[in-house]
Amino acid sequence: MKDFKLIRKLTVLLLISMFTINLAGQNEMSLYGLRLVPQSSYSNPAFSPNANFVIGIPMLSGISGGIYNTAFSFDELFKKKINSDSLFLNFAPVINKNAGMNFATGYAENDVLFMGFKTGKTFISFGIKQLLLTRLSYSDDFIRLLWEGNTDEANRTLDLSNSNFDELHLMAYHLGIAFPAGQKINIGFRLNLLQGLSNIQFEKDALQFSTFNDNDKVYRLLAKSDILVNTSQLAPLGISDSTQAYSFSNYFLDFHNLGFSLDAGIDIQLSERVKMNASILDLGSINWNYGTKSYSLTDDSIVFTGLAIDVINDKNFLNTYIDSLKNLVNFKRFSKNYSTSFPARMMLGLEYYSLDKTNRLSFLYSGRFLKNNFQWALTFAYDKKLSKHVTYKLSYTYLKYAPLNFGAGIVFDFKPFQFYVLTDNVFDAVFPAKQRYFQLSFGINIIIPTNEWYPSETLAPPPKARIPLKKPEIIDF
């Protein structure tokens, strides 16, 4: 009962903290806390496997990806025509939701190399990981202008500010360490040397359109803008023109765009059957000094009255349209060095074990700090260690705009080989068109275990059985 009271108090505190922040997912929720998989240390550096030596199969030890879209699923955007199997695009349901701002985020990760070993009670890991992270934010007014045009918006201002696209592609060279700090606490740190590969950053994104019509019933568009976009091309390839050849060595070893980040985590044994853990990830930034190009547009009076184009006879009508827009809009292009902060993540977990340590219930609150937005997720999970060779996990994840995500995963351990596959949403495979959230992670490792095997990944071996002492005999002299 004492353990359940502790869990109840901690859960209340977590829920209060969650709803006192202006919140709006997070990746790899199912992998968190699964300490027998070495890649779980990516989400908390304090986690370490019960192994003397670990090496991931290069390029195959950790592959994961995910997409989260707050506005619509595929079948909401594409509708079937009546009495036909063909599809048509329909943005009307999206516009009518009046969500204000919409977000779409995606990520892809791949372990190029992963290794780790235990020395004493300390576990040290190092490797190379590639990451691609994208984020699109757009307002309802942006979709309304694209879909309905401007004729129905006369004498009204459409605010497209905060509608932007950010992209970050990098290589991370990481060194991690996890060690006990007392009998009931494990702490861990990981230092990441970041090699920036490519980037798109909207530093300023103020844009408004006002539509009006004059006495001739001619619709005109008045735009006010204050936009600054910073970009960096795929720098390590050394591409400055189309004649330069691809260089594999430069891809990994050219550090013109350099950055650093730090991950930290803690794993606490609150009682024999209760653990609490937390981590903060990706605290750092990248300086972009190579292959940079910036574009700015600052104008309070861009007036567009339309173009007279012969679509039928002019085969190059699209180029004509684009050239006219270029003449109308005075984008300034220049080069400058800039920096981007890495979107930080946080995770807070609570775990309850069965007496034999083969069953575990867990709660996870996680999130990623994006520009002007915090994307959060809430996960409840159950995992079961069936034997030395098989462990499975079931989970439920709540996201604000995709509330029904039932996850599942399995880990096969036939030493020295380990194979794992997990997803936060099994419906991706069954009903892909109806989903707003997709996530999948899998990998293959080679693991040399320690001499002893325990039913669960505990901070310390289970206590040895105590042999009761006999009552001393009284001897009369």
Image (cartoon, rainbow, N blue to C red):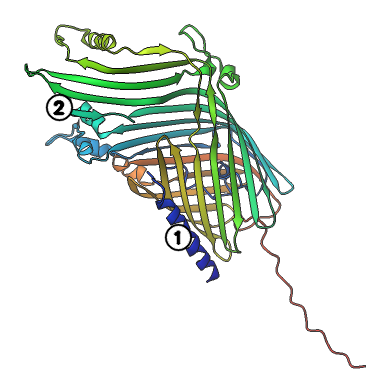
Q: Would you name the residue on which mark 2 appears? A: 155
Identify the residue at the far left of this view.
Answer: 216
What quarter of the picture does the C terminus occupy?
bottom right
Q: Which x, y percent locates residue 392?
A: 49, 53
**Horizontally, is 461 left or right of 218 in the view?**
right
User: Quick check: 450 above or below 293?
Assistant: below
User: Tag 2: Cα neighbours inside 10 Å, few (<14), some, or many (≥20)?
Assistant: some
Choose the circle earlier in sequence order: 1 or 2.
Answer: 1
On residue 12, the disc is 1
Tell me which residue sits at (37%, 12%) in the image: 332
Name the front one of labels 1 and 2. 2
User: Quick check: 454 above or below 369?
Assistant: below
In the rendered structure, which amino acid carries the disc numbered 1? Val
What is the secondary structure assignment of the residue under circle 2? Answer: loop
In the rendered structure, which amino acid carries the disc numbered 2? Asn
Q: Which x, y percent locates residue 421?
A: 48, 44
User: Quick check: 35 above or below 170?
Assistant: below
